[in-house]
Image: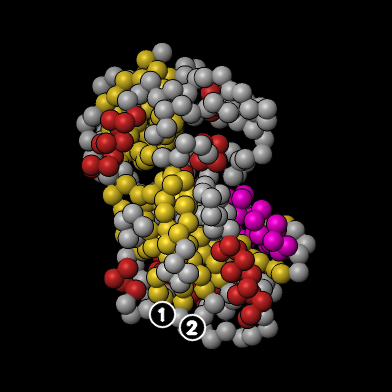
Amino acid sequence: MDSYLHLSNGKSFEGTILNASLDKTVTGELVFFTGMTGYQEVLSDPSYKDQIVVFTYPLVGNYGINDHDFESKKPHVAGVIVYEGDMGHSHYQARYSLQEYLTKWGIPLLSQVDTRAVVKNIRKEGSMMAAISPVKDMLLDTETKEMVQSVAEVSSKDISVFGAGKKHVVLMDFGYKKSILSSLTDFGCKVTVVPFDTSYETVKQLNPDGILLSNGPGNPKQLQYLLPNIKKIISSYPTLGICLGHQLTALAFGGDTKKMLFGHRGANQPVVDLETKRVYMSSQNHSFEVDESSLANTHLSVRFRNVNDDTVEGLSHKNLPILTTQYHPEANPGPVESIILFENFLQMINEYSGREQAYA
């Protein structure tokens, strides 16, 4: 059945809706993902909440959907745009087709769209609001709407404990990916997952050895009211911040963030570690970046940098055991993996075990 992708800049693209039973209009921020694989992880990553994702690789769905690679219990995207998405899947672990999975959750899958032309619009004019609709003619707002308090919708509501290792990490859940939790437990950590707005006092009662600030959706400044609490927590324990957690760390210590034109979303972003001079191929998903000029009067310095566009990809604190990455070290997109960042985090925990940190 014919359906349409309408962009807020006035452009429209015709396609075929693969789950025709979903005769409805959905709206969301239009973004694009450049990886050749990993669509199951993208769909279930809470950082993509309420976004319409355009997959640039032309064949999406050829290995189906399995029971193992979900990043959360349900998909969070508002809609999916592909060139071709109805091919038969052949992977031995597959339980569903891409079409079956999205139909189950009421998420439209629009195919036969000129995805190259759509992405050119985004790269030229930036991420924008869009709609997937059976209606041929539709006008949308020209400005992208920020997702207000989207973190609260994807964060855990209760405290949960995973693993039984000797080192205890409190994972502050802004919309964490399952693979982050798995990486910590694989390294022998006991992990306590807490809601995003958990107080310093509650964290202290849990007696952690370290803190991990997770990824999550939306503008980091939506959580500005929590920055004093976040600063107190991460100034008291060795900390690793990932994606949104990286941005919140910068804000907590007086830095600033800004929105990118179209962000980084894919599994092919080269990142250099300025300390070791080692380059990683990284997996990323973000619309916002840390403004490097805002770090001048903070105790934060750039540790990782994007090779393509020089954007800040990670920070370290000059006095405290704090390390952050804009990219996802738990992902495995390249030949030299960045999982070593978890080893560095555990090394920080070991070095600072039992010490009282200065509140900075």
In the image, residue 16 sits, relative to residue 77, either above or below, namely above
State if disc 2 and disc 1 touch (CB < 8 Å).
yes
Q: Was residue 223 drawn as part of the magenta stretch in this picture?
A: no
Q: At which x and y percent is residue 171?
A: 61, 62
Check disc 2 and give the amino acid type: Asn
Which sits earlier in the primary sequence, circle 1 or circle 2? 1
Q: Which residues are magenta?
A: 176-195
For image coordinates 42% across by 32% down, the residue present is 57
Q: How is the image coloured?
A: secondary structure
Label 1: state its secondary structure.
loop
Splitting the image into 4 quarters, where does residue 213 fall? bottom right
Q: Nearer the viewer, residue 139 or 55?
A: 55
Disc 1 residue crowd, few under 14, some 14–19, many 20+, Cα 10 Å: some
In the picture, the disc for residue 319 is 2
Q: Is residue 218 left or right of residue 356?
A: left
What residue lies at 64% left-to-right and 33% top-to-bottom?
66
Quadrant in the picture for the N terminus: top left
